[in-house]
Image: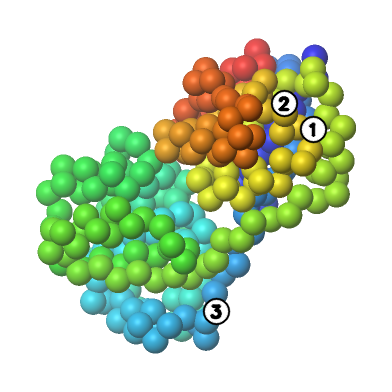
Amino acid sequence: MQHLIILTRPVDKNYHLSSLLKQSLAQVQQSATVLSVPALMLKPFRLSDLTDNERWSLRHLEEFDAIFCVSSSAVEYFFHLVKEGRYLIKPSTYFLCVGQATQAYLLQQGVTASQIICAEKGNDSEALWHTIEHQGIAFSSVLVVRAETGREWFKHTLQQKGIKVKTLAIYRREPALLSNEVYQTFRHLHQQTKVQWVFTSSEGVLALLPQLCSLPIFQQLVHHQFIVIHPKIATLLKEEIARLSANQYLLKDEQIHLSPADDQAIVNVLTAFLI
């Protein structure tokens, strides 16, 4: 039986995950086609694209006790703007994150390990907040570096605790259209092919699934396996497939598998199905 693994993250993240996956498959002497199908395009903003309030935040980074970078992309685009504008970050500033990949990217940017607070159990805002409370660290002001939307629960939770919160939207997420190669692959996919999908964001689910509705692969989704990094993505995945099919196609719980967010963990879950 043929195996197809579909990675839906942005191109650069798919590339690294794909490389690890191919190495792992070779080690266990298994073969599978790995297909990069980015669900989203990320468009970073320039300084001139930012609002006056956002530019103020960049000019006054020393005003914030902590900076929450919601993803590795947020880290990349944030430090690009910091270097471009030659903005200063005080050494005592904490950096908050929810995943090991983002933590690793912060370290690559020169942030010290002692400055980073990463969610200890789970990879969401709730886990990060529990970690902050557990460590007993008090903040008076936090900057949330994100796309145009997101992390509203975290923002509201901080505000309810009397913490001042500002948001810095530094990139836009847009649905990525299927390439002709991917379109043809999905159109002519053999029904006996064993397929595994990797979804790491709710936005990716919402961007990609509607593009599959007119293709034969959409009807086959009920026979596929899905790897997700958060229960909320699993719930949305089931809801969207049901909604788009008018409840004709319903995923079962055993088709969806939860994985930690780091690449090696995702690879381990994927290869476990092929051994």
Choose mark 3 or mark 2, whichever is in front.
Answer: 2
The residue pinned by badge 1 equals: 216
188 with respect to 255 (left or right) = right
- Give the residue at x 47% y 81%: 50
The residue pinned by badge 3 equals: 46
Give yes or no for contact between labels 1 and 2 (Cβ–Cβ under 8 Å): yes
Q: Is residue 94 visible?
A: no
Q: Is disc 1 surrounded by few (<14), some (14 to 19) or many (20+) residues within 10 Å?
A: some
Choose mark 1 or mark 3, whichever is in front.
Answer: 1
Residue sitting nearer the eye, 223 or 45: 223
> Which x, y percent locates residue 120?
30, 39
Q: Secondary structure at mark 2?
A: helix
Q: Earlier in the sequence, mark 1 or mark 3?
A: 3
Q: Amino acid at mark 3?
A: Arg
Residue sitting nearer the eye, 175 or 213: 213
Q: Secondary structure at mark 3?
A: loop
CA separation in Å, label 1 and label 2: 7 Å
- Give the residue at x 56% y 69%: 44
Give yes or no for contact between labels 3 and 2 (Cβ–Cβ under 8 Å): no
Residue 233, above or below 270? below
> Which x, y percent locates residue 195?
70, 25
The quarter of the image holding the C terminus is top right
- Give the residue at x 49% y 38%: 236
> Which x, y percent locates residue 60?
30, 81
Give the label on residue 220, or none.
2
Residue sitting nearer the eye, 243 or 27: 243
Give the label on residue 6, or none.
none
